[in-house]
Image (cartoon, rainbow, N blue to C red):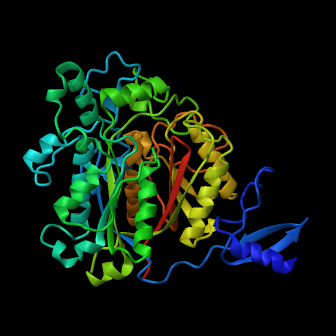
């Protein structure tokens, strides 16, 4: 029986963080794991236990963050963005880029004063969707932050540099304008750029064309979990030795009538039109839905070996991540948080860290009635002792930027690691009972971060968690 048990364990192809916090449902087969474990047998069922593997030491496989770039309601500069988060500023305003007066929701995290001068030529700018514009500007700014501006890019092998920027919804302006043109003006007036510039992948494609990056180039679309999916995939390319450097993250420009109408119809949006500044209320008893935002957030991720060779600024280390799916409902998360807790555990195993090492969480915390508590339920399954763990919600100030949310929150997480300051979760008026975490309510707090995780979850049951720490040689 012992030999048979070992054979079963060796043959398995599923790797999860064991032991699972919740027992497996009775209708599921037992799950076995591949790495460090011991096996016990009970009632003829093999149950495998494992400890987190040791943290990666190989400089070719260690992944570091060397640059950050964004487009946000607080502008296109990373330091300004974080300073305004620390100040507890609110970026939510009444929408005026289109007439929203007949919509049940009339406010959002609208980008204002966007300037692409020096990053996109005038001819290209006119043809592009905002989704592509934001991607290109954020990507180039991230490279500048990484010491790879125009004059420095000769330092890297462009065949081993790639771009992986995803979007949850994509290029709605070009798409909706093309549909309207076809209906109102006819086939002959539809631009030949309508399909190319409606594609999700065209932002990273155009960015790579400008930069000459010939490595992996594509988009992932996993709704609001998109950015973290991209970080995980980009890190895997680096760890597998296929590339030296990746620009990775997410972008969204869904504050257009079509996207706004669809989300309004779904009932997902807050309708607090009388007080939009307090509409995004993560973990507050009176929350009534998410606030839609837009923007882009990307990281430059490199192997430690490559970063050291070019004497790059190392901002933080990406330790690992994980993704999975609820397989439950297209918009509602599982209320018990089972798959989310599993995803958190898997991310920690992938990162080589223990539960006890984590002391900061950037929550998904979208201000939705079901989602906020589902995330809390999942976190409490993993973190039995919440003392010393602080958690905040970036969305309380910038809204939910959908596919870009994880990118903008990863930047906030890295800045928290660098500065030792956590931005507040604003609009905490009447917190739900039983939260048990310090949510950094309404005022910034100092906090020396050991290990940080950033959560993102999306429609379709997509779950993603990424793990960061300060870089330690």
Image quadrant in which the N terminus is located: bottom right
> Looking at the image, is 286 positioned above or below residue 26?
above
Count of all numbered marks drawn on residues in the image = 0
Image quadrant in which the C terminus is located: bottom left
Q: Position of residue 171 (x, y in %)?
A: 29, 40
Residue at the outermost left position: 122
Residue 131 or 389: which is nearer the viewer?
Answer: 131
Judged left or right of residue 236, residue 219 is left
Residue 451 shows in this picture: yes
Q: Position of residue 389 (x, y in %)?
A: 58, 58
> Looking at the image, is 143 positioned above or below residue 282?
below
> Looking at the image, is 353 positioned above or below residue 111?
below
Name the residue: 21% across, 54% down: 206
> Looking at the image, is 306 positioned above or below residue 204?
below
Q: Position of residue 121 (x, y in %)?
A: 9, 50
Q: Position of residue 384 (x, y in %)?
A: 70, 57
Judged left or right of residue 424, residue 206 is left
Name the residue: 40% across, 46% down: 403
Residue 70 or 340: which is nearer the viewer?
Answer: 340
Residue at the outermost top position: 102
Residue 322 or 315: which is nearer the viewer?
Answer: 322
Residue at the outermost front position: 188
Question: Which of the 4 image quarters holds residue 40?
Answer: bottom right
Residue 317 shows in this picture: no
Name the residue: 50% across, 31% down: 289
């Amino acid at each position: 029986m012992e030999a048979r048990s070992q054979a079963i364990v060796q043959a398995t192809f599923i790797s999860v963080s064991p032991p699972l916090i919740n027992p497996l449902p009775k209708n599921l087969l037992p799950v076995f794991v591949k790495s460090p474990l011991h096996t016990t047998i009970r009632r003829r069922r093999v149950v495998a236990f494992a400890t987190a593997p040791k943290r990666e030491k190989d400089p070719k496989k260690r992944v570091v963050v060397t640059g950050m770039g964004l487009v946000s309601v607080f502008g296109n500069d990373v330091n300004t963005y974080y300073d305004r988060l620390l100040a507890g500023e609110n970026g939510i305003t009444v929408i005026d880029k289109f007439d929203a007066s007949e919509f049940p929701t009339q406010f959002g995290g609208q980008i204002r004063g966007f300037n692409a001068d020096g990053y996109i030529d005038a001819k290209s700018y006119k043809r592009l969707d905002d989704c592509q514009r934001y991607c290109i500007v954020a990507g180039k700014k991230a490279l500048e932050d990484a010491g790879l501006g125009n004059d420095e890019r000769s330092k890297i092998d462009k065949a081993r540099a790639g771009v992986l920027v995803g979007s949850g919804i994509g290029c709605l302006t070009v798409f909706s304008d093309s549909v309207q043109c076809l209906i109102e003006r006819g086939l002959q007036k539809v631009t030949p750029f309508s399909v190319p510039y409606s594609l999700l992948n065209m932002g990273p494609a155009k960015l790579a064309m400008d930069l000459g990056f010939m490595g992996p180039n594509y988009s992932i679309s996993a709704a609001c979990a998109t950015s973290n999916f991209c970080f995980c995939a980009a890190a895997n390319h680096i760890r597998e030795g296929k590339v030296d450097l990746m620009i990775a993250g997410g972008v969204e420009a869904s504050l257009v009538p079509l996207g706004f109408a669809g989300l309004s119809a779904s009932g997902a949006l807050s309708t607090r039109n009388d007080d939009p500044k307090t509409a995004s209320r993560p973990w507050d008893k009176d929350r009534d839905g998410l606030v839609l935002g837009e923007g882009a957030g990307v990281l430059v991720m490199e192997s430690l070996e490559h970063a050291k060779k070019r004497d790059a600024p190392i901002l933080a280390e990406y330790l690992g991540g994980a993704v999975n799916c609820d397989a439950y409902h297209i918009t509602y998360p599982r209320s018990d948080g089972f798959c989310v807790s599993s995803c958190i555990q898997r991310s920690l195993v992938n990162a080589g860290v223990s539960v006890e090492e984590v002391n900061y969480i950037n929550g998904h915390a979208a201000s939705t009635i079901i989602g906020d508590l589902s995330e809390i339920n999942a976190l409490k399954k993993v973190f039995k002792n919440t003392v010393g763990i602080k958690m905040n919600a970036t969305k309380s100030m910038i809204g939910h930027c959908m596919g870009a949310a994880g990118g903008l929150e990863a930047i906030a997480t890295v800045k928290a690691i660098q500065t030792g300051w956590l931005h507040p979760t604003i609009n905490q008026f009447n917190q739900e009972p039983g939260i048990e975490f310090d949510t950094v309510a309404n005022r910034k707090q100092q906090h020396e971060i050991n290990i940080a995780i950033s959560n993102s979850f999306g429609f379709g049951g997509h779950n993603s968690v990424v793990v960061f720490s300060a870089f330690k040689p």
